[in-house]
Image (tube, grey):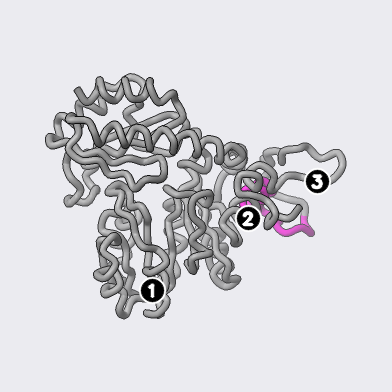
Amino acid sequence: MTPRDLSPASIAVSAGRPHAPGDPLSAPITLASALVPGGDAEYARAGNPVWAPLETIVGELEGGDALAFASGIAASAAVFSLVPAGGVVVAPTHGYYGTTHQLRQRGDVEVRLVDVSDTPSTVDAMRGATHVWLESPTNPAMEVADLPTLIAAAHDAGALVAIDNTFRTPLRERPLELGADIVTHSASKLLAGHSDVILGLTISRDPELYAALRAHRHDHGAIPGALEAWLTTRGLRTLAVRLDRAESNARELAERLTASPLVDEVRYPGFGTIIGLVLDDDQRAQRATESSRLVRYATSLGGVESTWERRRRHANEAPTIPAGLIRLSVGIEDVEDLWSDIEAALA
């Protein structure tokens, strides 16, 4: 069977496995900096055998050619390296602050920050843009963008479009099929899924974009470690079952939180594993995140364990994010245990 005959859940399990007689069922970790000449690479900064299974899986899931990077920020830096001096980039006001910080640090590009849930205003901002960077939902405001409309409008404006697909994963959305030029992931999150990896990915279909991103990775040394690539590959094998369980938990918790008098606002788009909940008092929100027992107080997301934090505790978070907004990343624990813990902490 070819990848086109398989569901994404089956691709995640089956893609990138060795096939020669006597090979191990799972590709081994290759701990080597130098490789025997004559192959695709002689030095491991140019290529490592352990990257290939990971890039194959993600490439087949997203429908393009994948490249593994040292981190999600390294992947976005590679994308932003494509923006020329004097370029214009449209990006979410409430997107991940690490990427908006990268753009501001450039100094030689114009950055237009927009509310991506406001489609007409976002389209207006694309006039004269060279690049458009989108998140849907945004991190941490949970704003949802009309990606097909915005991608089409960006291309009409002559802009290249990159989509951060970390929150949805290719099991829920494939932005390249919607017309995006590049997709990125912080694979540290749902793809790897166990809060033990820092790794990023880009995926594209255009050979020139792929070559430019690969050259940036090589020239800037933004390569993943062999162990990190192997762990991400192993984590991907269970993505479908982890995502189904965590998303089911998130839907149930969002419904209960919406009905709870302990919460002023719930931001959940009806899919995914991340919930935004807003309390009217930032100190009460901080105390809640510090007093839970099962839900861990931590800054990451997408792991098998549930985590939460008050986002405005970070100095670089956008000042328009409510001070009492808690980002809850829902894991795969028993939903009744999660609800008991969250309800007690909020109280």
Q: Residue at x 28, y 34 (%)?
A: 309
| Residue 197 at x, y percent in the picture | 50, 38
| Residue 147 at x, y percent in the picture | 40, 63
Q: Residue at x 32, y 80 (%)?
A: 128
User: If you read the primary sequence from the N terminus, does the residue marked by circle 3 or circle 1 appear first?
Assistant: 3
Q: Name the outermost residue toward the right.
A: 21
Q: Quadrant of residue 22?
A: top right
Q: Which mark is residue 19?
A: 3
Q: CA distance from mark 3 to mark 1?
A: 42 Å
Residue 42 lies in the magenta stretch: yes
Residue 69 lies in the magenta stretch: no
Callout 2, which amino acid?
Answer: Glu
In what quadrant of the picture does the C terminus appear? top left
Q: Which residue is mark 2?
A: 60
Residue range highlighted in magenta: 37-55
Callout 1, which amino acid?
Answer: Ala
Task: Please give the count of numbered marks on the rendered protein.
Answer: 3
